[in-house]
Image (cartoon, helix red, strand yellow):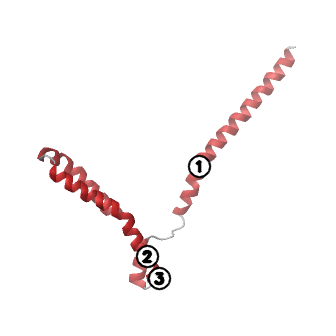
Amino acid sequence: MIIACRKLSDRVFTLCSILAVMLMASVLLVVLVPVLWRGAGAYVFRGTVEHRRMMMGEFSRGSEVRLSAELLAVRKAREPVYQAIEAFEAEMSELPLARRKELRPAFKEVKEGVALLF
């Protein structure tokens, strides 16, 4: 009786251990696969609009039509950010002086960050 109980508990423990390892491996895959998939692009440089513009200007490489279409799409994509900055600047002019002084350093930092990104 005790040996049968011991064999059963041994098998249950083994099954639980296998399931725990499988669960950890699946969670690890769920977390790491997207990271590795997206991170693989860091090794293969496909270029940016700015890079293609520089290649066109410096070496006359690429398609001017495609580049102008890409630049137009980039301007459209960046426009909401610029509009939000302009709207906030307009709001800041209506704020009390103390509040403006408080917000000005953070806003300047945001503008510099956007200028650096774009």
Evaluate if marks 1 and 3 touch, with contact meaning CB atoms under 8 Å apart.
no
Lower position in the chain sequence, tag 1 or tag 2: 1
Residue 111, picture quadrant: bottom left
Q: Position of residue 64 (x, y in %)?
A: 43, 83
Q: Amino acid at mark 3?
A: Ser
Does 36 sit left or right of 65 as displayed?
right
Evaluate if marks 1 and 2 touch, with contact meaning CB atoms under 8 Å apart.
no
SS class, disc 2: helix
Which quadrant is home to the C terminus? bottom left
The residue at 21%/51% (across/down) is 105
Q: Position of residue 108 (x, y in %)?
A: 23, 55
Q: Amino acid at mark 2?
A: Ala
SS class, disc 1: helix
In the picture of the structure, the residue carrying the numbered disc 2 is 69
Disc on res. 91? none
Does 104 sit left or right of 29 as displayed?
left
Lower position in the chain sequence, tag 2 or tag 3: 3
In the picture of the structure, the residue carrying the numbered disc 3 is 63
